Amino acid sequence: MRLEPVAQPTLIRTIGLPALALAATVAIASLLAMVAGAPPLSVLGLILQGAFGSKFALLETLNRATPLIFTGLAVAVAFRARLWNIGAEAQLYAGAVVTATLGTGALAWPSGLLLPSIASAAMLAGAIVLLVPTVLKTRFGVDEVVTTLLLNFVVLLWVSMLLEGPLKDPMGMGWPKSARLIPEARLPRIVEGLRLHWGFGLALIAAAVIWLVQARTTLGYEMRAVGLNRAAAKFAGIPVGPVLIKTALLSGGLAALAGFSEVAGLKGSLTLDISPGFGYTGIIVAMLALLNPFGVVVAALFVAGVFVGADSMSRAVGVPTYLADIMLATALLLMVLALMLTRFRVRWA
Amino acid sequence: MDIVDILLSASFWAAAIRIASPLIFAALGELICERAGVLNLGIEGIMVVGAFAGWMTVYSGGGLWAGVGVAMLAGMLFGLLHAVLTVPFGLSQHVVGLGITMLATALTYFSYRLALPEVTSPPKIEAFQPLPVPVLSDIPVLGPAVFSQTPLTYLAFGLVIAVSVILYRTPLGLALRAAGENPAAVAAQGLSVGAIRIGAVMAGSGLMALGGAFLTMSAFNSFFFEMVNGRGWICIALVVFGSWRPGKTLIGAILFAAFDALQVRVQQTPLGADLPYQIFLMMPYLLSILALVVMSRRAQVPAALMVPFNKGER
């Protein structure tokens, strides 16, 4: 078989194929629900209902989407410049550690000064964590996929060490958990009485800022050029190395904000399980969003909905929650295939 | 115990060889894929599948070698999926590989929960037992270290030789290496680059799954979540460290495993008691990164690695 570019893709092609990919994902999930001994339609209904069916469910989904918007943006920014940052998980934890270190009383400042300071310090920490593999790449030609992946394990062990050492809560009954943040270091709720904190607002602002950077600034243009064709970008006089470094700082900082928002917003303290893989899921979010910042918000809501819905479905009918992970991985693979097929036609020869 | 004493003891080297075995299988698998021009980031998930499939087969009454076969078949199935998406369709090998890892891991955990809904401690199986090689196992130090292992370890070492011979001494190996270096030349010879690459990814994925199966069938004797724990990613580093050569990759795996075995033992010395245990657990990952930094400059990367081949396009 051969692939042939489609000169002018029809609307049916550009809309129909991605829709088909989603439909196939749902079909596969239904099949697995049947294997698990539950009626597929009710499983899908329960997922939808558990994700969006009530005010409580919807708030839960928005809360779950918040870190995913940050990690999704982090991955989207990096992938656009073809910097393969698979280490958003590590950068998230770096941001979370800084938040827990500065927010538990080390700095007794008013909220208006403290929160921006902590957020900036967290971003710096995340940026540094991604800077290491990026410099190894630009200086020594070390593949960043493997180094960012391996650093995830290193950073998680480092957090574990801190939580059993200097960051450990003396009142924590021996649990590896940090002390609670002081009230000035907590992100306030957007609407009093509703369980949704300003981390979500910050995530939306971050998406808008990234859109502006990508669409309206020289850096955005350079990052795109480096991603499309590194050799051509270099030939055109774009400083490829420095652009990759700037991309890394931006991407690592965004991922760290996920950790900041989880600790200062949702949880109020740092534990080793604040992220059930938000860094890795960010890759799915970014790919489903076609690396578009506003797409990331939509994709994060979808992905968060699948997770939250699957949790409540699992409690109701006992199908393992891993169905959510299967659905998302399937959606990722089928979607990249569908998107390619909107631009290429298969010729059997 | 002194570090020198540790390094001279047979039990230390026996542990190192045992730790190296799953890495040898999986790194050989990755090497075959990459030599044909395909980066397989599905390795981590495929090892999870292999670990579960092998264990499950034995747990439900199958034989040990049947378990090995089922694990390899399961791995090849995911390899086929990876290959179809990345070879004829030419999709991003990064994205597809990570997607395969996520899918394989999620499907495994889903199946495990379905098969054993209410277990708290994972059930054990009657796993492969050490099989001392007659005569050779009586050699001091070397005997207990190398020749008193389980059959799967012998298989791992045998495969290093087999893969070397196939890669460098057969037309098939030549075609495979050429597919990763200069696919246009392979196509000009009238061979199908696509078929070679799909075959290589399937075979390599089978070996990765075998590496995972070693964990449940020859090391821990039961299956638990997160048991692969980054070993797949470490194998990708080992392939770079070994400059895409089976022999050097084997040496890398043994060095790495020796270091891993050493850190476990140093943890039990007075020096180790003063340091947080996480420092020791970090070492394998930091060592892999260091190995990449040292080797990347001299590395002979297959020229067409990660470059899709679309016949008739230039």
Image (cartoon, coloured by chain):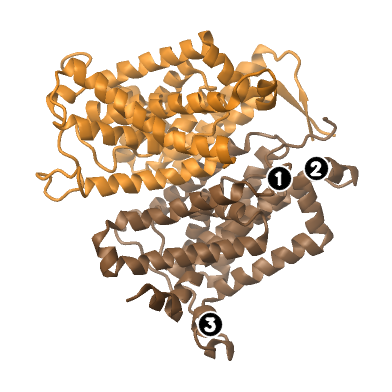
Chain colours: A orange, B brown
Q: Residue at x 50, y 79 (%)?
A: B145
The structure residue drawn at horizontal position 33% and vertical position 43%, both measured from the top left corner, is A318
Nearest the eye: A41 or A333: A333
Residue B238 image point, x, y percent: 57, 55
Kind of residue at disc 3: Leu
**Amino acid type shown at disc 2:** Pro
**Residue B183's disc number:** 2
Whole-percent x, y for residue A60 in the image: 28, 26
- Residue identifier under label 3: B142
Above or below for A80 versus B22: above
Report x, y in % for residue B65.
57, 71
- Depth check, mark 2 against mark 3: the one in front is 3
Q: From what the image shows, is residue B28 above or below residue A299?
A: below
- Whether residues under marks 2 and 1 lie with C-beta atoms below 8 angstroms apart, the answer is yes
Is residue A276 visible in the rendered structure shown here? yes
Quadrant placement of the C terminus of chain B: top right
Residue B37 tag number: 1
Q: Are marks 2 and 3 on the same chain?
A: yes
Chain where mark 3 sits: B
